[in-house]
Each structure stands twice: as structure tokens, then as C-alpha cells.
Image: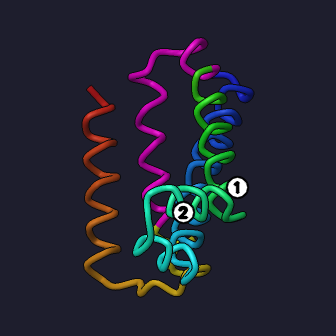
Amino acid sequence: MSALILALILVSISLSVIAQILLKHGMSNPIVQASFKLDLFNTVFTTLTNISVLAGLIAYVSSAGIWLVVLSKIDVSKAYPFVGLGFIGTMLFAHWFLNEPLTTVKVVGTVLIVAGVLLISSN
């Protein structure tokens, strides 16, 4: 795997992690949450005009676009195990930026998921 492909994989995964954090931040906004008590149009409008939600969606689309480039260059069985890094990044960023608790159970669970991905990808 070339350095460029590895860099693209890491950028794609990073954008996916950032997207998760931005979407959660946007959907936690009291104005967005209050819109769910209104009609469907107001809910959609309020959600899609929230800057964090918009930025999260843009990050997701960017991540997917880069991922498509990666998949055009290497086998999915070689690229996909790196997605396990997203679990670690999402857990840490949620702790740092959203003040979500970082418990032993979360850490152990995340490590087990990553270990499983590594086991599957080694065959």
C-alpha cells in the first residue's frame, strides 16, 4: 500500500469521525430538539439549517468521496480494517468535545471491536 493511499484512508476515517461529532453536536441543539415537536417541514428545515449538521453532512460526503477513491485503488479487504480506527477516534473525540464519559466498559468494548477487525483482516 502506498503512502498516498494510506493518507487517503486516514483522511477519510478522520472526516467520518469529525462528521459523527458534528452531527451529534448539531442534533443536541435545543432548537433542533424542540423542532421535533412541530411539523415535519419545520423539523427538516431546522435540522438542515443547523451549521453543525450541515458541516457534519459535508464531512460525511467528503469522507465517502475519498473512500471511493481508496476503493478504486486497493482491495476492500485491505482498506476496510482501517475503519476500526474510527471507533477509537469517535470515542475519544466524543469524550473530549462532547464531554461524554470515557468508561472502562467503553474502552474495553472499543478495543475488542478493533481486535476483532484485526483478526478478521489477518486471514
Q: Secondary structure at mark 2?
A: helix
Residue 71, position in %: x, y?
54, 18
Residue at the image position 45 percent from the left and 24 percent from the top: 78
The stretch in magenta equals 69-90
Image quadrant occupied by the N terminus: top right
In the image, what residue occupies the spot 26% across and 59% down?
112
Q: Is residue 72 magenta?
A: yes
Give percent across and percent down for residue 62.
68, 37
Q: Tell me if residue 74 is in the magenta stretch.
A: yes
Q: Secondary structure at mark 1?
A: helix
Residue drawn at (60%, 44%), measured in percent from left and top? 60
CA–CA distance between discs 2 and 1? 19 Å
Q: Describe the colour scheme in one phrase.
A: rainbow
Please tell me which of labels 2 and 1 falls first in the chain.
2
Q: Is 12 rendered above or below residue 32?
A: above
Would you say the magenta stretch is mainly helix, strand or loop? helix
Q: Which mark is residue 55?
A: 1
Which sits in the foreground, 63 or 120? 63
Residue 2 place in picture, x, y as percent:
68, 22
* Identity, as a three-letter code, of the amino acid under mark 2: Asn
Count the marks.
2
Under mark 1, the amino acid is Ala
Q: Position of residue 50 (x, y in %)?
A: 67, 65
Answer few, some or many: residues within 10 Å of disc 2's Cα (few below 14, many 20 plus, some between 14 and 19): some
Q: Nearer the viewer, residue 55 or 67?
A: 55
Residue at image mark 2: 42
